[in-house]
Image (spheres, rainbow, N blue to C red):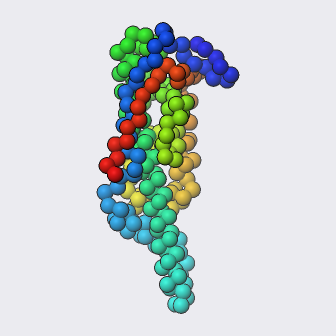
Amino acid sequence: MEILGDRKFVEVPGTVTHELPPLLVRMSPQVRSLERVMGMAQDLVDQDGMMPLPPAPAELELERRRMDLAVNLVDQYLAFVQHWQWGNSILEWIRQCETTFDARLELRNLLRADVWPHAGRSSFVVLLEDKLVKTGGVEIEKAVGMRLTFRQPPPLKCFSDQFLIYLNTSVANTAYQTWAHMIPSPVSSLPPERFQFQVVNMSLD
């Protein structure tokens, strides 16, 4: 094990750079109907009492504010979906990396057997961060936390405005940190200079 500063790195035998499977990810949030999502957002604004009852002359202003709030909720939901998509792709990529490691004698002993999704595989998440993968603003750990929390992204109507505006980041980060720290110490990183892979945008637009 190699120690650099406060980081511990596994020792990969040999000197070759190992090619890992490509990370296939939809970089644009995919929803079936944006119009339907907008309708759910407007219902959420009404049901959660986010708007006060105005005097009659202020009805147009109220409708404008209602629309602004709905648009904001849609933006928050699309960001949630985008993070979930990244997290789902990352977990699938980790699964493929496991297969690659298992097939190569010099890498096989670097992973310990465990129940999927293996908490020790957070080393692959750290590898993505070390390789400075361009995510378009998606936070990698939050994305994995979203996928660990939700097997599928729920429709907007299942969320409260409080979750979308205030809570989703803390929930996702807590889920990731809990998962990542389930492995016994010491937790070792994969040396980024020994691995390479491509990131492929699978979005249609």
Of residues 34 and 175, the one drawn nearer to the viewer in this rendering: 34
Q: Quick check: 21 above or below 170?
A: above
Residue drawn at x 56%, y 36% is 177
Q: Quadrant of the N terminus?
A: top right
Q: Position of residue 22 (x, y in %)?
A: 37, 31
Q: Where is residue 35, by image quadrant?
A: bottom left
Does 40 appear above or below 52?
Answer: above
> Residue furthest toward the right?
5
Instruction: Residue 196 in the image: state x and y as whole percent.
Output: 45, 25
- Where is residue 114 drawn, in percent x and y? 43, 22
Residue shown at 44%/62% (left/top)? 74
Which residue is at the front of the view, 167 or 92?
92
User: Measuring 40% from the left and 18% from the top, which residue is drawn there?
Assistant: 101
Q: Confirm whether residue 49 shows in the render.
A: no
Check the image and name the residue furthest to the bottom.
Answer: 57
Residue 55, x across and y down, in percent: 55, 88
Q: Residue at x 42, y 28 (%)?
A: 197
